């Protein structure tokens, strides 16, 4: 069986799942709203509802599991509440303690840098209300793990909560000039 792979720019406010039978989620937006994916398609990892950017999908469950467990780099742009300090950046890079599944967890070391200007990304969704009365700063952060809401928890742990989060890369696959909601077939995922 030939497996199919896709990359999408998941918009803000959409769940990283194709559908749900949960009545509490009937007013939510799902990935199936974007494209008629073939049966058996599943997301590779997740982005929380308030995050946006690159999400991979595949019909190959083994490949999905391999990618999730392999330590492949994931790159994010994060808009932070406040002007991040060099000390906070150094602390993030070494790893910080966050909550995960009711336990304390120390994140692996990562690559992180402050951006001198905003990245070239689509305009924010109008539902994303950003406070404009305080200074803010952009960082680029690359992690090799993916705990639930990890980047948001990491930046909050050093005192700079994330206001907007965009994943722009997984391994060697990026979103380049994609726009929110765009879906593209990917011939060989992470070949």
Image (cartoon, helix red, strand yellow):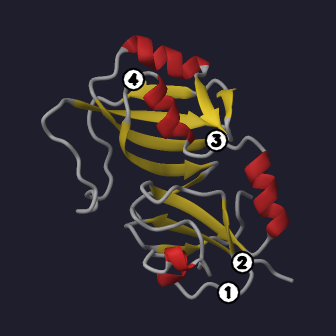
Q: Which mark is residue 38?
A: 1
Q: Earlier in the sequence, mark 1 or mark 4?
A: 1
Residue at numbered disc 2: 4
- Residue at coordinates 34% horizontally, 31% vertically from top-left? 115
Q: CA distance from mark 4 to mark 3?
A: 24 Å
- Determine whether the residue tagged by mark 2 lies in a helix, strand or loop: loop
* Label 2–label 1 contact, CB within 8 A: yes
Residue in the picture at 61% in, 33% down: 99
Q: Is residue 153 above or below residue 84?
A: below
Q: Residues within 10 Å of mark 4 (few under 14, many from 20)?
A: some
CB atoms at circles 1 and 3 under 8 Å apart? no
Looking at the rendered image, the disc whose residue lies closer to the viewer, 1 or 4, is 4
| Residue 7 spot, x, y in % from top left | 57, 67
| 128 vs 157: above or below | below
Of all residues shown, which one is farthest toward the left? 133
- Residue 98 in the image, given as x and y percentages of width and height: 59, 29
Q: Nearer the viewer, residue 5 or 41?
A: 41
């Amino acid at each position: 069986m030939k497996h199919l792979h896709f990359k999408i720019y998941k918009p803000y406010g959409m769940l990283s799942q194709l559908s749900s039978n949960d009545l509490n989620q009937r007013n939510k937006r799902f990935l199936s709203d974007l494209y008629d994916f073939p049966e058996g398609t599943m997301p590779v990892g997740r982005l929380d509802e308030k995050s946006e950017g690159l999400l991979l999908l595949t019909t190959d469950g083994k490949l999905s599991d391999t990618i999730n467990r392999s330590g492949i780099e994931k790159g994010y742009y994060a808009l932070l509440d406040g002007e991040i300090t060099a000390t906070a950046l150094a602390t993030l890079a070494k790893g910080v303690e966050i909550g995960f599944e009711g336990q304390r967890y120390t994140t692996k070391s990562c690559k992180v840098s402050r951006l001198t200007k905003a990245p070239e990304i689509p305009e924010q969704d109008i539902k994303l209300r950003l406070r404009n009365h305080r200074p803010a700063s952009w960082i680029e952060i690359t992690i090799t793990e993916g705990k639930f809401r990890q980047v948001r928890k990491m930046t909050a742990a050093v005192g700079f909560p994330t206001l907007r989060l965009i994943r722009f890369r997984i391994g060697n696959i990026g979103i380049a000039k994609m726009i929110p909601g765009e879906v593209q077939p990917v011939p060989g995922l992470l070949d």
